[in-house]
Amino acid sequence: MSRQPSPISTHLKPFLQRNAPVLLGLLLVWNMLLAIALVGRFQPRVPPPDQAEEPASSPTADSLAQPFLNALPVAGREGGNVLDNRRYTFRLPMPQEAVAAIWHNGRPILTQIADTAGTYKFDLRLRHGENELAVSVWRKDQSLIYRDRWNISITSALVEKLSRSMDRGSRHHPEMALTFDGGSVAEGAVEILNILWSRGITTTLFLTGQFIEKNPRLVLQMLADGHEIANHTYNHPHLTTFADNGLPETLEGADRDFLQGQLFRTDSLFRALTGIPMQPYWRAPYGEINPDILVWAAEAGYRHIHWSPGMDTMDWVSDSTSTLFRSPEAIAERLWEHARKKDGLNGGIVLMHLGTTRTGKPVYTILDALIRDLQKAGYRPVKISQMLENGTFPG
Ligand SMILES: [Zn+2]
């Protein structure tokens, strides 16, 4: 039994055939209107999330690194975040008397109330890494009009590079760095500077903001002697839970704003005194770092310089009954033990301190002989920047 065409298709078929061009045109117009309505609903200038992955339309690492690089010299002078320069404008259509709220990475950043219907602009700073944006628009009676959410991934080549902590230079070159940290105490600083000067050694000194406040003359002396000064935060706070549980988890309250505030405050003090910025090196108090902390500091223009494993001289231990306590001679001997290992002290970053609360013989009493013997053994004590300039720093 053959199928009979239904009455509808009998009439519809000739109709469709006759009017095909008109119908196709109408369909096209309808699709265009639909597309315009969807796109116009919420139109960011940055690519939406699905496009953000594509290199053709997403901000490339280079295009982001360039303005970031340009921003570096003003960082700190304004006391603000260097990424403030990377602002994006978003457009948000809103009916009259609507209320919009916008969240960035879970944090409310803006509430907009529309006096008249229209498209409202708002500026937003996007960060290296994942940016989650959420928007909700309500009517006056609190009923929801629309809600949207995107994830935009931004990669800054510079932030990525700065967020790599360094703890050793090249193992193939006899360069090493005798670095000193300066915190709450400066006893010993004058003697140490004199020894470095008389031996013709320049190095990298990591100073807290409090050290700079208390010892402005010493800071100027350090610069006059040719040393480079790096950021050691303002008041040497713990940043992770390491001291409590041995884990590198960020301590509560030690968030991005806190750390960048510590770095900027110290930088402002240093700039006010010397006229030069502290970037690009910093060292975390107690060496407490994790990937988040490294990125937050990198956003402020700083790369972390750790000490090489086993090259903390422990000169800060003042209690002679502690198992960690080492006499000045024992400290020198430890370094020579390292020197006898496979790569010796090549690329080594040694940690010592400008201040001491030791009551016995200060550690700096061995410094002159130590530098002399290191030089005799062929080592060149240098600044961190020299290790980088000479291309002997990996990464
Ligand atoms: Zn320290």
Image (tube, rainbow, N blue to C red):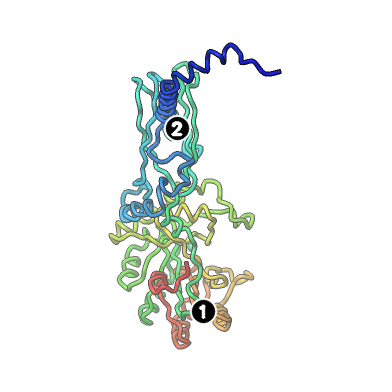
Dot 2, crowdedness within 10 Å: few (<14), some or many (≥20)?
Answer: many
Above or below for 374 versus 58: below
Choose mark 1 or mark 2, whichever is in front: 2
Q: Residue 56: image x %, image y %?
A: 41, 48
* Residue 19 in which image quadrant: top left
Q: In the structure shown, which secondary structural element does the residue marked by tag 2 occupy?
A: strand
In the rendered image, the residue lying farthest to the top is 7
- Location of residue 271 by image quarter: bottom left
**Residue 234 appears in view:** no
Label 1 CB, ligand 1: below 8 Å?
Answer: no
- Give how far across and how far down residue 33 sits, in percent: 41, 25
Residue at the farthest right position:
1
Q: Is residue 378 above or below residue 130?
A: below
Kind of residue indicated by mark 1: Leu
Name the foreground residue: 22 vs 323.
Answer: 22
Which residue is tagged 2?
102
